[in-house]
Amino acid sequence: MKNLILTSLFLFILQIQCYAQERKSNLNYVDPTIGGVGVILEPTRPTVHLPNSMVRVFPMRKDQLDDQISNFPLTITSHRLSPVFALMPVSGTVNQAIWNERIEYGHETLTPYYYSTSFENSGSSIEFSPQSRSGYFIIDFADYQKHFLRMGVFSGKGEIIVQVKRIISGTEEFSGMKAYFYAEVDTDISEVQYQSSANKKLVLIGLGDQPRQVSFRYGISYISIDQAKQNLIREIPDWDFETVRNNAQTIWEKVLSQINVTGGTIAQKRVFYTSLYRCYERMVDINEYGNYYSGFDHQVHESKEAFFVDNWLWDTYIALEPLHMILNPEMEMKKIKSYISMYEQGGSMPSFALVFGDWPAMTGNFAASWIADAWFKGLRDFDLITAYSGVRKNSIDATLIPWRNGPRTSLDDFYNEHGYMPGLHPGERETVSIVDTVWEKRQAVSVTTANSYSDWCIAQMASELKNKNDEKLFLKRAANYKNVYRADKGFMWPKDKDGNWIEPYDPRFAGREYFTENNAYIYNWDVKHDLHGLFAEMGGRQKAEEKLDQLFREDLGKSKWKFWNTQPDASGLVGQFVMGNEPSFHIPYIYNYLGAPWKTQKRIRMLLNTFFTDNLFGIPGDEDGGGMSAFVVFSMMGFFPVTPGIPVYNIGSPVFENVTIKLPNDKDFTVIAKNNSDINKYIQKAFLNGQPLNKPWFTHDELINGGTLELIMGSQPNKQWGSDINNSPPSAIKYNPGLGY
């Protein structure tokens, strides 16, 4: 009996230990379905991939509520865009329906490293796991009927070739370049049927009429089919799905273990680690073991250096890239070096650097913000002189018109001379031919505010390079935002070419004629580089604080559906504040600059609890491949980089009791929030490395050198902590990182 009791006790302890070990993996908290139903715009996708790697796969459907899958792409070439090479297992009689069939699916297993689902009509199932430039599918065909792999090209331009009994390859043209794949199946191909039309090319690859399991492994390339084959052989040399899956799982476990949290709820951990997973979808390295194809000069380059593409900088410069400057500084420098190579190859510094070249989306010159931020955080392994040449050229010699590339136009000459982008009066016809007159328009005010900030970053780079003339020039341009702030109305306001304020004009309802995806209420605060100068324009700190309060309380002025007709990106509304769009991310932290950090703490907790939940509706706007998720990661940890280019972090209100970041230099930075809870969200006292901290910010150096930020939390705001305006975070047009804070 004694031995039986001891054995039972041993087994019980072993079970507890096994469970504890299982919970050590932060992967257990990741749920790729979070946000899978888009709020107004795009849903998240349950993307299966290795961190920052070429092959990214998810089931093609409308959203997570859609019960039919149309295809699985062999990869996507950009976040949620441009899939290539459709794959779908189908069964049955060959008729018109089978060529176009969308198949109902049942239970899914969704992780960053592995996907599986079953099909409700046939009982067949599919599994997938990735490597960096290759992937592995397993299909279980369940019944006695003809079974096929249906393959095709999404663009309609390309071909799928069945070369010999078990080898398939293909080419697909998209956006002026080509993608290639090479694949092998472990079952003899019994028949091949093709269907082609003007915009569709499909092939049915027969695999017999018996129940069977079929393995399909493949490599992807932007160079050639032969290179795709080499990528496959190098990464998946054997028919061993479990090795591929286990390798992918191990890589993700390592990445997600770089930040460890305790406290908070299970739901908050699910939100946090799912957000961290989404921060690793891009940029992606497309160097294929010594060679890469560049869409910026359409050449194959021999290089041992990584070549990163797929960055939507308008979305990522403020949170995603700064997050990786902490977690992965070596990778971040390789990304910037890739941008510099793109500039050398194509003649301009990209805005959205996609695999096929620059996509001049959105507004601003945010490569300048990104590069300046890296440099002043001590990331120096890149050519600052060449980088500076590229961002300077974008500012002075290229067009600032939204969604356009090319040399400067008459509008840009006007901007350079007068310091603002002129707007058109309601009903006035566009006079510059390259402006998109259908939807994007001039976005005159936000072009001015965005480039004011970008030019401030260029001024800091010029100072670092001892170029005094350029520093003076760009500091002057950094103040251009003042030209579109109308003090008597208290709003950013468009001016015409004659310098007159445009009327009639309502700050709530002005669309893309004057603003980018938001209205004047948001762009009032788009002055990250000179917040104290902005407060002065608003009539002083007290009036600025009142205006910021009112942002979260202001009525929409019409019903939501009518408001969204003009502002479809304005999701996650709190008053006129827009949680679901990137230009808003820094705004709740502005209270720190106004001497009221308790209001930052209040707003951040409310926003996180309201809009970032662990269900299908858990993302309030377009997630944009890590752009929004990085805001969540930072804010849940308790700090945020308001002004890239100034290496400091604003303190908010962490949701966890303990956050430990394992830094690449083998040091740890820890945030401890004592007495933390949903109610105890206000900072009472703070200590940095044991010393009292009476300001609501700390430096990047203090973070990367390791240490502990200790916050004592309470249920009522301590309105004195961090209230000294002289201790507010640095944000000034004359700030010079080379001279310190």
Image (cartoon, grey):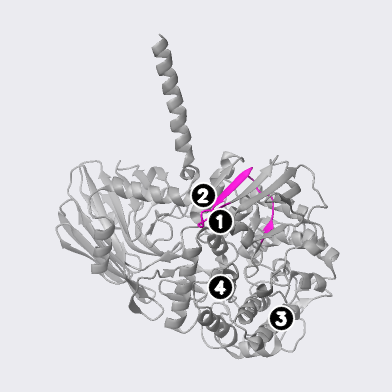
* Residue type at tag 1: Ser
**Residue 66: image x %, image y %?**
45, 50
Residue tagged by mark 3?
A: 480
Occupied quadrant, residue 51: bottom left
Residue at 69% x, 74% y: name it. 739
Q: Which mark is residue 629?
A: 1
Membership of 660 in magenta stretch? yes
SS label for mark 3:
helix
**Which residue is more in the foreground, 270 or 7?**
7
Crowding near the residue tagged with mark 3, few <14, some 14–19, many ≥20 C-alpha atoms within 10 Å:
many
Q: Position of residue 554 (x, y in %)?
A: 77, 59
Q: Disc 4 marks which residue? A: 371
| Span colored in magenta | 649-668
Q: Are marks 2 and 1 in contact (CB under 8 Å)?
A: yes
Of the image marks 4 and 3, the number of the one nearer the N terminus? 4
Q: Earlier in the sequence, mark 2 or mark 1?
A: 2
Label 1 – label 3 distance at C-alpha: 31 Å
For the residues bearing labels 1 and 4, Cβ distance under 8 angstroms? no
- Relative height, residue 379 to residue 711 (above, below): below
